[in-house]
Image (spheres, grey):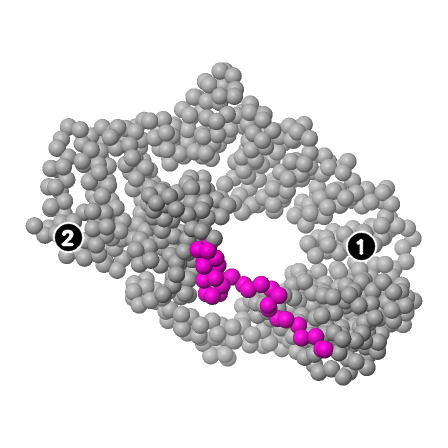
């Protein structure tokens, strides 16, 4: 039996209540979630940084990782189950949290350290937590290496088995500097180091990288940097030549295997068609073994998976392009290493080695044009391949004789302007560090990039400029900010740029923000929706940031003015949290601001978002006015299933204030709830949200009993007797009502 423990030590930090759960989940999900809760499916949970993290038993997995957050007064759930968000597991976790909070309030107890240790041990047994890294993949270093320093590494390596050689290589990559007497200079070392990049280059590589930790490849050149002895370093540089030549040959072999050199592209197409066919086949087989439970399959899903014969299987252009992109991404790091190695050879005057690796090694990559025009894939649109070619040009630019430093900077600028990718940004920065130009020439280069950014704004150019200005030209920060803000409406990555602008302004004097405020607001208003990915407009996001910024700087009046301006220009964008902030700011301002505040509230009640206006009325104590607005609220659903309405959520918010509401409005609320119940009862038993129906019936009882001019108890008994006689056969509904202290039976 599973031991279930929950960390309730910070339970009061999460402002969740039952009304919020009912408001934010659709009725079907709430019903399913309550069933999971009552079946004790919540294995464990903990509060962490205004979140609740939990594990809930599931259908496809022993448990799902579930998270609850509250944002803008809405409960937001995310889950590792197939639904992904606002699912039944989130409801179960929320209800369990509420029950534990209630129990803690009654008992006044929190778990001790021993209980929390049990939670951790249980999580480790179930596979949620990784054991300490030192117990994973322990390297088996040969005993000879541990006992005696190795003087002749070449002889020693030849005596080792392949597995020992690989373990030894991994050891060197992590702890090379611990023994200066050990020097690695064999071709085998080069190939073993990059083998993980060259053995699995297709769509399973992401999983491979995560499992084996090859995201941070410690290349031979990285190890070379740690060799302080110059003669040993020179020996390594020359001896590794054969290894890097073999590395390039392996890359060529991979290209030939995929048919990249075939003139008509048929081999390339067939190679990736086979990869995609195998992947699709494996996916279908996996889905077949992991179906939803029987009730789901009969109710809403039709699994008729079928994979056509291989000869009839077509590989679409987008899939082919993604495979090719991935391939060139995987070989980018080794090729960069080869380019750096060529520069080292050049420094040691090994020009014949340099010439060989360029002409026989990487020149073909620079000249490579994929045979994919007839397949609908333009080689120039393979960004990873273009990055690869740019990296080679940029890295090897030091082998070119330039008449002046500015000519070399112009060359780097032209390469970046042609292909301003994130990869090239990194390479440009490393080259500038190596070139170490004068302060005057550095500013010259920054100016060229800034002018190019103003003409064609792009996120990668912004990032490069920011890093260059931070390091070399802080005096240019205002020009950079102005150009970034003015180009927002033309920038396809306006949302990303704006967030960085906020960060830059936070590091500048307040006067800088005040100076930029007007253009920041005007530019954010002009940004089209397609240029950012977000649920709210960049204008409102900018207002939010400015208000937060001024609030932290204790500039209450400026923060107040920005919110009032939001009401005037975008009343629909005004949220309830803005109202609470206005209330918080008002006492610190002069009485002259009170009329502006009252005018803003009036505008929101007339032109603002209906839900915000409804909540404002409740906050202002105008409950009857709020009731009258229920009919104007949307009846659209929050989820895929049409089982929930915002009207029911509004009634849920009014229930705590029912004693202050007029009877005529109570009758209207009851009518709305009865109509909702009738709608829910019309669904099939498999699809009927019984827990939500029971909750609505409980609300009806609360409202009827609160009647002032009528005998509420008698009215309740009369209505519920009729309802019970009609629906008493619904066993699940009877059970759901019983948990709320309501007995349904035939009389």
Q: Residues within 10 Å of mark 1 (few under 14, many from 20)?
A: some
Q: Position of residue 130 (x, y in %)?
A: 54, 63
Q: Does 505 sit left or right of 469 as displayed? A: left
450, 123: nearer the viewer: 123
State the residue at coordinates (80%, 62%). Answer: 226
Q: Does 8 sit left or right of 727 as displayed? A: right
- Closer to the chain start, of discs 1 and 2, is 1
Q: Does 377 sit left or right of 53 as displayed? A: right
**In magenta segment, residue 155:** no
State the residue at coordinates (26%, 51%). Answer: 691
**SS at badge 2:** helix
State the extent of the magenta-drawn residues as a range: 114-143
Q: Position of residue 64 (x, y in %)?
A: 43, 60
536, 319: nearer the viewer: 536
Q: Does 427 sit left or right of 645 as displayed? A: right
**In magenta segment, residue 142:** yes
The image shows residue 101, relative to residue 162, as above or below, that is above
Alpha carbon separation for disc pair 1 and 2: 78 Å
User: Which residue, given by chain and number where applicable, does mark 1 sit on?
Assistant: 431
User: Which residue, given by chain and number where applicable, does mark 2 sit on?
Assistant: 727
The image shows residue 625, relative to residue 526, as above or below, that is above
Which label belongs to residue 713? none
């Amino acid at each position: 039996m599973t031991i279930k423990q929950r960390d309730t030590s910070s339970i009061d930090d999460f402002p969740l209540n039952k009304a919020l759960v009912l408001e934010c989940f659709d009725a079907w999900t709430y019903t399913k979630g309550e069933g999971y809760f009552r079946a004790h499916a919540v294995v464990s949970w903990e509060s962490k940084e205004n979140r609740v993290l939990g594990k809930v038993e599931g259908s496809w997995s022993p448990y799902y990782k579930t998270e609850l957050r509250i944002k803008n007064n809405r409960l937001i759930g995310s889950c590792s189950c197939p639904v992904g968000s606002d699912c039944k597991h989130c409801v179960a976790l929320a209800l369990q949290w509420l029950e534990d909070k209630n129990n803690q309030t009654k008992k006044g107890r929190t778990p001790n350290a021993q209980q929390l240790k049990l939670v951790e041990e249980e999580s480790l047994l179930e596979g949620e937590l990784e054991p300490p890294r030192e117990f994973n993949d322990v390297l088996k270093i040969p005993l000879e290496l541990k006992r005696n320093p190795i003087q002749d590494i070449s002889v020693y390596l030849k005596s080792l088995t392949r597995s020992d050689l690989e373990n030894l290589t991994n050891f060197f990559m992590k702890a090379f500097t611990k023994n200066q007497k050990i020097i690695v200079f064999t071709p085998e070392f080069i190939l073993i180091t990059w083998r993980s990049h060259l053995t699995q280059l297709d769509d399973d590589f992401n999983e491979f990288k995560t499992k084996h930790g090859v995201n941070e490849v410690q290349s031979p050149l990285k190890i070379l940097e740690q060799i302080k002895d110059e003669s040993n370093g020179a020996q390594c540089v020359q001896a590794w030549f054969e290894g890097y030549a073999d590395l390039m040959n392996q890359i060529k072999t991979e290209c030939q295997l995929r048919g990249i050199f075939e003139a008509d592209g048929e081999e390339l197409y067939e190679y990736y068609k086979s990869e995609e066919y195998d992947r699709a086949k494996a996916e279908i087989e996996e889905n077949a073994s992991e179906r939803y439970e029987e009730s789901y399959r009969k109710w809403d899903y039709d699994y008729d998976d079928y994979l056509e014969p291989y000869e009839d299987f077509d590989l679409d252009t987008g899939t082919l392009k993604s495979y090719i992109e991935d391939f060139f991404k995987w070989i980018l790091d080794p090729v960069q290493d080869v380019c750096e190695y060529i520069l080292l050879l050049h420094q040691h005057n090994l020009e014949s080695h340099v010439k060989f690796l360029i002409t026989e090694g990487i020149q073909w990559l620079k000249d490579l044009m994929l045979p994919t025009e007839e397949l609908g894939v333009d080689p120039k649109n393979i960004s990873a391949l273009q990055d690869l070619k740019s990296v080679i040009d940029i890295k090897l630019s030091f082998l070119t004789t330039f008449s002046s430093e500015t000519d070399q900077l112009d060359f780097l600028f032209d390469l970046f302007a042609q292909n301003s990718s994130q990869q090239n940004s990194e390479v440009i920065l490393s080259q500038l560090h190596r070139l170490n130009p004068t302060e005057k020439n550095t500013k010259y280069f920054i100016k060229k990039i800034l002018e190019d950014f103003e003409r064609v704004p792009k996120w990668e150019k912004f990032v490069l400029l920011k890093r260059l200005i931070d390091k070399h030209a802080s005096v240019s920060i205002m020009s950079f900010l102005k150009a970034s803000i003015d180009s927002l409406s033309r920038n396809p990555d306006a949302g990303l740029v704006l967030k960085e602008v906020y960060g830059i302004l936070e590091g500048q004097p307040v006067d800088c923000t005040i100076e930029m405020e007007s253009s920041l607001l005007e530019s954010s208003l002009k940004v089209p929706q397609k240029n950012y990915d977000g649920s709210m407009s960049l204008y409102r996001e900018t207002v939010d940031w400015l208000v937060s910024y001024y609030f932290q700087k204790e500039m209450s009046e400026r923060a107040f003015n920005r919110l009032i301006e939001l009401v005037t220009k975008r009343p629909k964008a005004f949220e309830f949290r803005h109202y609470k902030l206005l209330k918080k700011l008002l006492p610190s301002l002069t009485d002259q601001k009170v009329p502006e505040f009252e005018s803003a509230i009036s505008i929101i009640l007339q032109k603002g978002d209906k839900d915000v206006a409804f909540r404002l009325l409740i906050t202002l104590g105008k409950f009857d006015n709020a009731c009258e607005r229920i009919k104007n609220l949307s009846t659209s659903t929050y989820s895929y299933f049409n089982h929930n309405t915002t009207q029911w959520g509004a009634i849920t918010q009014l229930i705590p204030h029912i004693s202050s509401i007029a009877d005529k409005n109570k009758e209207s609320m009851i009518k709305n709830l009865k109509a909702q119940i009738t709608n829910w009862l019309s669904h099939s038993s498999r699809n009927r949200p019984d827990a939500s129906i029971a909750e609505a019936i409980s609300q009806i009882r609360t409202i009827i009993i609160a009647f002032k001019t009528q005998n509420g108890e008698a009215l309740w008994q009369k209505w519920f007797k009729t309802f019970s006689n009609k629906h008493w056969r619904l066993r699940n509904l009877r059970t759901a009502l019983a948990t709320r202290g309501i007995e349904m039976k035939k009389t």
